[in-house]
Image (tube, rainbow, N blue to C red):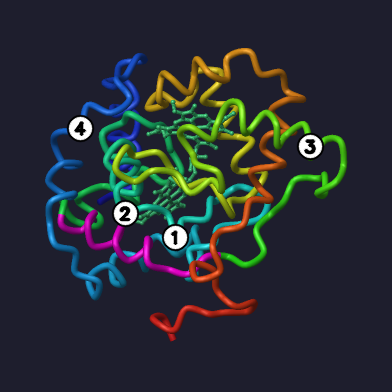
Amino acid sequence: MSIKKTVLSAVLAGLIASPAMAWNEGGGEQDSALHLTPDRENGIEVYEVCSACHLLEGWGTEDGTFPQLAGQHFEVIIKQLADIRAGNRDNPTMYPFALESEIGGPQALADVAYYISQLPMNPDNGKGPWEEGTPEFEKGKKLYADNCVRCHGEQGEGMKDKFYPLIQGQHYKYIIRQFEWIRDGKRRNANPDMVKQIAEFSDEDMAYVINYVSRLSPPKDKVAPPGWQNPDFE
Ligand code: HEC
Ligand code: HEC
């Protein structure tokens, strides 16, 4: 696709999308992709485009520009991709690379989502400033127990059947940005119950709770050894 056309479709997607999106209407690509049998080999091929930003390991960047994708639930990845493609979640950087004309239809979504969900996770994600035992860590821990556990789980493992994302092991700076966007209504596909739950969070509370989240470790069998390199791209 030419640059001009790509930019034009990105602009149109922004214009057409209504500001108040239902957070999970389902249907369309999302439902089709969820019911297809994923082809891992094609997933590798599709993922090559993605790796330019999310890196070959799917680990994203500590500065939060690009999120870790590795280990996320298959269902969540499909929903987020379908939302981005449908213009329900703004992502102008990625949008042109995620289009059907670039990577393919629902089958490609299923393939790449499956591939990503099986990648081992970053053993050294970006953390917030406060270590376990500090008063700030403890405040974050309490805020998490009171406000987040019922949806994201004790260890930040999420709930795949409900499309609640896994948030353990994610980079602190990325989580801060998403949390702020969800709180302030900038992420249009956000879950309305989460928006309600965090509406009163001050910026300080936000930093405490995200610090805690960034220090929640995924189970050992989901994490790569330090220095692991993705053998599928040798
Ligand atoms: C040009 C860079 C770029 C490319 C290429 C790219 N992405 Fe992204 N992606 C991003 C950025 C930036 C974000 C975070 C946007 C934000 O902050 O909301 C993102 C977010 C995502 C998310 C949401 C993650 C979450 O935690 O909610 C998914 C899923 C995703 N990308 C998958 C893919 C897949 C699959 C491909 C390949 C088909 C791809 N990306 C290609 C830049 C890119
Ligand atoms: C009612 C359930 C619910 C509650 C309570 C909730 N969340 Fe969420 N959260 C969600 C859902 C659902 C999404 C994904 C929305 C979407 O599809 O874009 C989400 C998304 C997120 C994301 C973005 C993840 C990503 O990969 O982009 C972060 C970070 C997050 N939640 C953190 C929190 C924290 C921290 C709390 C507590 C202070 C919290 N949430 C409370 C349901 C909830």
Q: CA gap, disc 2 to disc 3?
A: 32 Å
Nearer the observer, 185 or 170 = 170
| Of callouts 2 and 3, the N-terminal one | 2
Q: Secondary structure at mark 2?
A: helix
- Which residue sits furthest right? 134
Question: Magenta span has 123?
Answer: no
Answer few, some or many: residues within 10 Å of disc 3's Cα (few below 14, many 20 plus, some between 14 and 19).
Answer: some
Q: Are marks 3 and 4 in contact (CB under 8 Å)?
A: no
Q: Residue 157: horizontal and vertical position, in percent?
A: 48, 49
Q: CA gap, disc 1 to disc 3?
A: 27 Å
The amino acid beneath tag 3 is Glu
Q: Which residue is mark 2?
A: 74
Tell me where residue 148 sits by quadrant: top right
Q: CA gap, disc 1 to disc 4?
A: 22 Å
Q: Which residue is mark 1?
A: 71
Tell me where residue 203 sits by quadrant: top right
Q: Which residue is mark 3?
A: 138
Magenta region, residue range: 107-121
Q: What residue is at 15 percent from the left and 41 percent from the top?
A: 31
Q: What residue is at 59 percent from the left and 48 percent from the top?
A: 65
Where 104 sits versus 48, above or below? Answer: above
Answer few, some or many: residues within 10 Å of disc 1's Cα (few below 14, many 20 plus, some between 14 and 19).
Answer: many
Q: Residue 20: horizontal and vertical position, in percent?
A: 35, 14
Q: Which residue is mark 4?
A: 26
Secondary structure mostly seen in the magenta stretch: helix
The amino acid beneath tag 1 is Gly
